[in-house]
Amino acid sequence: MPSRKFPLALTLTAAVALALPSFASPPDLSKVTSPTDLDAVVAKTADPALKKALHEYAKDILAAAADAPHVEAVAHTVEGAKGKVERTNTTPEALAKAAGGPMAIFDTLKLVDLSVPNTGPHDKRVDDPYDAAFFEHLGHLHALESLNIISTKCNDDWIAPIGQLTTLKKLSFTNNGKLTDAGMEKLAGLTNLESFNFVGTQITGRAYAKCTGWTKLTHVSHRGSSIDDEGLKELCDHLPNLESISLAHAHFTDAGAPNLAKLKKLKGLELGAHATAAALQNLVGLPLEYLQLGEGFTGADSIAAIKPISTLRRLTLTNCKDLNDDGLKLAANLKQLEQIEFGFLELPDERLPQLQQFAFLKELKLIRRPQPYSEDTQAKIKALLPKVNVTFK
């Protein structure tokens, strides 16, 4: 009997099909709310490997099922208010393999951002859907890595559920309701934080006494808060790996400033409020690359105090309205700099030639709001510094 020949393509297709593993269809877990519900699903599952995986990950499945309504509540509220969410799926690897792919019950959120496009941090919401119940829902997003809370009425009590989100790496509060040290203490267990902003609040910083283990935290902003001398001490004692911090408009004085010297890895710092130029002596041994000086640091003595910081590359002086010619000359002696930003620097025509002292810079920023420098003045300055990138705002 003659042998039958099969096309090569058909033979290869059959071989590949035999070599590939077959997966069971993922079971529908959308209605699972209890162990009894899950047991019923497992009982109807024919595939032995999948049945075993469902048993082994029963606890994870039930936890995901319990969180699912909260995930959808948060997503619905945020997207309805023009905020932003990013979704992820946390199906355990072995379970996903047995089921042939991720399971919908494990859909959750990894990012929640309440900011509204084309609005600023001080803009008030016309409609604010973010009530206490919303923050309760947030407390069930156990895979959340990034959370931005801005322009809400949240207070110390409302934010307590956020303290359960130990997967958080980035957490930001900006210009919300009354937030104090009592509220911040409820976040002390968030030891995976890498970036933390608690902006426009009434905290003194003393809550940091509770924040042990915050060794991953490298970036902090307390702009517009009330960090005092004792609070600054606790902050510096508990954030050993800090690389940048904003203490603009803080309340600490020269008495608390020596604690800044403990921040041995600090590269960026914003200062302003009740301390004086004497406080800047504590920065000399730090590896600072960027420094912003605000209230209390507007004189020539502050500029002289930072000259020994050899690592400094960028300097912002927020209010130079009263900076005299001697102060301007001192700033020009900071040859280690690549960029300087002057805020509200008085520049009549007769003073413009002094800017030639800054020809060593890569960039010069001149800020004056709301009335900018005239087009004629801008043109003259650019002509004086042809090799410097000069920008105006």
Image (cartoon, rainbow, N blue to C red):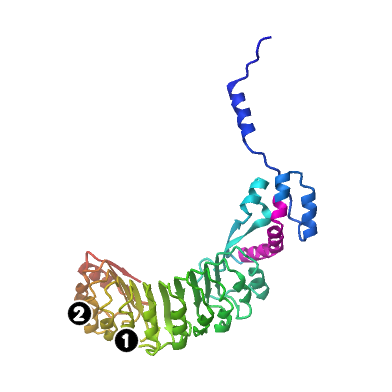
Foreground: 338 or 84? 338
The structure residue drawn at horizontal position 50% and vertical position 67%, both measured from the top left corner, is 118
* Relative horizontal placement of residue 171, taking residue 127 as reference (left or right): left
* Relative horizontal placement of residue 206, taking residue 384 as reference (left or right): right
Q: CA distance from mark 2 to mark 1?
A: 29 Å
Under tag 2, what secondary structure?
helix
Residue on which disc 2 sits: 350
Residue 163: image location, x then y, percent: 60, 73
Image disc number at residue 87: none
Residue 202: image location, x then y, percent: 52, 84
Instruction: Please give the range of residues in magenta.
Output: 53-80
Foreground: 297 or 115? 297
**Residue 180 visible from this viewpoint:** no
Q: Is residue 393 above or below residue 46?
A: below
For this orientation, the residue located farthest to the top is 1
Quarter holding the N terminus is top right
- The number of discs equals 2
**Residue 205 visible from this viewpoint:** yes
Q: Amino acid at mark 2?
A: Glu
Task: Indicate yes or no whether the magenta region holds residue 59.
Answer: yes
Residue on which disc 1 sits: 277
